[in-house]
Image (cartoon, rainbow, N blue to C red):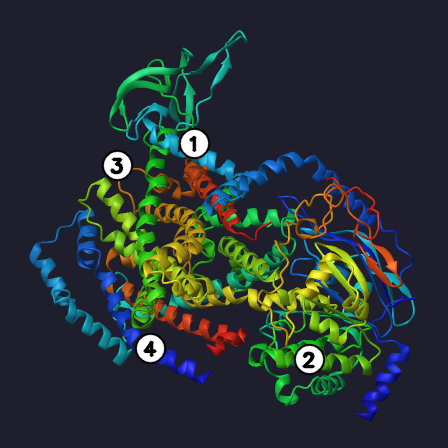
Amino acid sequence: MNRLDVQGLKTYFFLDKGILKAVDGVSFTVGDQETIGIIGESGCGKSMTAQSLLRLVARPGEIVHGQAFLRRKDGSIVDILALDANSSELRSIRGNEISIVFQEPMTSFSPVHTIGFQISQMYKIHTDLNKAEIRERVLELLTRVGISNPQQRLDEYPYQLSGGMRQRAMIAMALSCKPQVVIADEPTTALDVTIQAQILELMKDLQHEADMSTVYITHNMAVIAENVDRVYVMYLGRVVESTTTQQLFSNPLHPYTQKLLRSIPRPGQRVDRLEIIAGSVPNAIDPPVQCGFFSRCPAAMVGKCDRTVPELVEIEAGHFVRCFLYSEETEPEDEWTNI
Amino acid sequence: MLNFILRRSLILIPFLFLISIISFTVIQLPPGTYVDTYVNNLKLQGGTVSEEQKASIEAMYGLDKPMAVQYGLWITNIILRGNFGNSFRYNRPVTDILQERIPRTVSISLVSIFLTWLIAVPLGILSAVKQYSFWDHLFTFISLLGLAVPGFLLALILMYAVYAQTGWMISGLFSPEFRSEPWSVAKFTDMLKNIWLPLLVLSITGVAGIIRVLRASLLDELNKQYVTTARAKGLSEWQLILQYPIRIAINPLISTLGWMLPAVVGGEIVISKVLNLPTTGPVLLEATTAQDMYLAGGIVMILSLLTVIGTFISDILLAVNDPRIRMN
Amino acid sequence: MEKVDQLDRQADKQGWGNAQAPTADRSRSAMNDRSAQLNQRYRRNKARRQILAEQLYGASQYQLMRVKFKKHRVAMLSLYLLGIFYFVAIFAEFMVPYTTTQRFEEAIYASPTQIHLFDAEGKLTTPFFYSSKSKIDTATFRYEPVIDDAATVNRIQFFAQGEPYKVLGIIPLNRRLYAVEGEQPLFLLGADQLGRDLLSRIIYASRVSLFVGFGGVIISFFLGILLGGISGFAGGVVDVVIQRLIELLMSIPQIPLWLALSAAIPTEWTGIQTYFAITLVLSLVGWTGLARVVRGKILSLREEDYVTAARISSASNMAIIFRHLLPGITSYLVVHVTISIPYMILGETTLSFLGLGIRAPDVSWGTLLQQAQDVVVITNYPWLLLPAVFVVAAVILFNFIGDGLRDAADPYAR
């Protein structure tokens, strides 16, 4: 059985203006020691998927549907989405079984507590170690993630560290209790390119050392290409294509994926105009019942693609697409379809 | 950090001089001098005072000299001899009167502040965490009442309520029988029976403000990213609230600590007058209206001084609490 | 390092400290219930939402604020109630039958008049009351209204004719909302020591108390924005000087300053002059708070990227201030004004209560409360505390409106 099995996750935001369907029926699996990628534009619901997993969604957002089966370290299986919001079980999953490395390390750390305090807290919450043991491990951890002078850094505040170091500290904190799944939410977006490479290397190494699976959430194809085994492409809250990285690059099926790949400028190839995806992401509040990509799809079929939502179907082995070009199946309606 | 303190301290001295000048001026604003008040009182009782008598009294007290000279004399006396002059009305040194009143004022103030914070901080936190719940609305309404009802009014209403129900008039700290008696257990109990009212009034007015401030500032912080991170670490809601956002949400309250210093010593003026408390407040009120120059001037100056010191302490406390401020 | 690794391996096998045994497959009913609830609610509101969405599309900042404010029921109610307060205050001559100085010597400390709707036979009739005089009860030393033996009936007339007066000083009128046939006084809220109708005095007093806030707020508004804005925008020496000035002013304890300034108002000044002087006094203390906040906001907004963008687009300083910085502050200013007015009202009430504010023959709620200083008096004649109810009500209403405005102006509010 997979480590993590998410089925039909729906996270909606109930606003005065209408319902924002941030995550609209997303399913994915994470196996042992696997690296998954979730790619998509800003606003497609990738971060919200991660946060929903750890039940971090706040009002007016609600998780209205879905199951997320986690195989815990001790072998037991639990549906995270069914747990009581205040349960100690949920708290024992956060940081201990599943961790998130957030996007912006500056705002993700408390500005008035030292790095050492914040990282040590992970041990205090999830283990029974004493102060000295915790300190030892934190120092080791900081060294492992490549932070020089860990004794000094321990007592420093977030604003005293550089961006790259803060991100490393963030990673250290997330990994401290050896979670089974680490979700990295755009871990390198806020960093410059050279640091990006280092951070990704670091995460790869750490993954090998510990028995860890990683989920990369990004909009950067390069990250996917280098690090990821399987990819899920998201658009407007839905998974539109999912397959192995290799397949994705060699045989992208969904029009969105194709355009996405074509829009990457290739070094060595001169072009007069860069390829773009015309239009912009439509409003996700009270979306009409249609394929989300309809307004920008070059292969859109009027009368079909704007009337119903295609279902995610396995076209070839391990390669799923949500598009009427490949299948006639439609997404079944539920109580939220025509609200 | 030391730099910070040094810089602020240097500004203090010229500031204090300016304050002394302003205090003196403020006291002189109402027209006339104490002698006028004295003369008026005499007239009301049927006596008469001729213009020459009045002028000679004024000369005796040095009230006929030009303003600048009077100020000069006053301030040199204070700095060189610690002599704040005499109160015209009580015919005693200002320092004596203050020594009598200030300790009492301070004790009452401190106890009421302690009570205020004891009640207000948990309620403020609860209000923010359970936003829009029944408790939140209840506390918000109570704090609104606390802000809308002027303290003296509350005092009046409570006094009336107690009197109407029990026939007992709460006035001052002690019942008439005990006022001039030496301290004893009975006197202490009597004080307790009287003091609950001023403490209640003082606390309620304070509680309202603090609940509002804390609620607003905590709500601001609760939406921030680091709170989500803390939650993602597996902390329970209360643990994470008390450890993280509270630290920052408390900042505005720490700023108010600075204002508290003069308030603790000066006491609440109008409430004290209504309740007849033997604190600094009523004395200041009388002194200002009667033109009891040295008494009023002395108190105003001390209170201003305390305000400046209090703000200074507030700044230091803020820097201690929030390392980001130290950086600036 | 060895030891740590060993410990780690051990822990890995045994599981870390806090891991809990999983609960048996919990039903997802909590999620399902909530989901169904929201679903229903949204289906019901669909039409309304669409209208709202159309309204809001392309709405300006102020339009958005207005729509949001209107949804805040408490604030809207407060707005209406306050409107009524002000309306009554402006048209006081029409609303109440007596002036502030009209005395009825036989009605000292009269209690609120009992109004009857049913006559002696039990038939419904126009409201009336019986004539009475105030007499001292020798046992309690309290004035009691004693109905005279003739039990003369006095009818209450609505829109009755009476002494002519001028609405707003211009339009002559002689009808009043209610009045009494004949000479007997009607005290809806009782009378004071001199036999003056408390209700009439309260309504006339509201003219002073409700409007004193505006003058003060306008002055402190100007001073605050001007000096705070300059301070924040210009920075440098100007900023430092203004800041020190503000700190200096703020270190003078407030009430003594008020006391001194009020006591300094010459007694010869007329009511109106005194009134404006009080306004000035109140605002002098208030502007510093606003200046500080304005400065703070401008300082933080000045560094925002959108201001830099404006500068790069060659926007003039004036344009930057008015079109870019000011809108960010406006919402705060609006709220500040609504909160300052009750502050001024309370200030004036306190000063007048102490005898340092509005002087006779003018009345404000504060001066009316002077009579209530004596606890024995209040116990005997508790209606004398009623002006307090008005003060509290006005302040609460302003605060609710302020809250509504703040929520409306906040783009992140729920």
Q: Position of residue A85 (x, y in %)?
A: 77, 57
Q: Determine the CA span between mark 1 and mark 2.
A: 66 Å
Q: Report the residue at 87% width, 79% height from top.
A: C12
Classify mark 2: residues with Cα within 10 Å, few (<14), some (14-19) or many (20+).
many
Residue B213 lies left or right of residue C257; in this view the side is right
Q: Are marks 1 and 2 in contact (CB under 8 Å)?
A: no
Read off the chain for label 4. Answer: B
Q: Chain of mark 1?
A: C
Regarding mark 4 in the picture, which secondary structure is present there?
Answer: helix
Q: Considering only vertical position in the picture, is B272 above or below C83? A: below
Mark 1 and mark 3, same subunit? Answer: yes
Q: What amino acid is at disc 4?
A: Ile
Q: Is residue B220 visible?
A: yes
Looking at the rendered structure, whether the residues under marks 3 and 2 are on a common chain is answered as no
Residue at numbered disc 2: A199
Image x and y of residue B107, in percent: 48, 66
Residue type at mark 2: give it.
Ile
- Judging by the rendered image, the residue that carries numbered circle 1 is C84
Callout 1 secondary element: helix
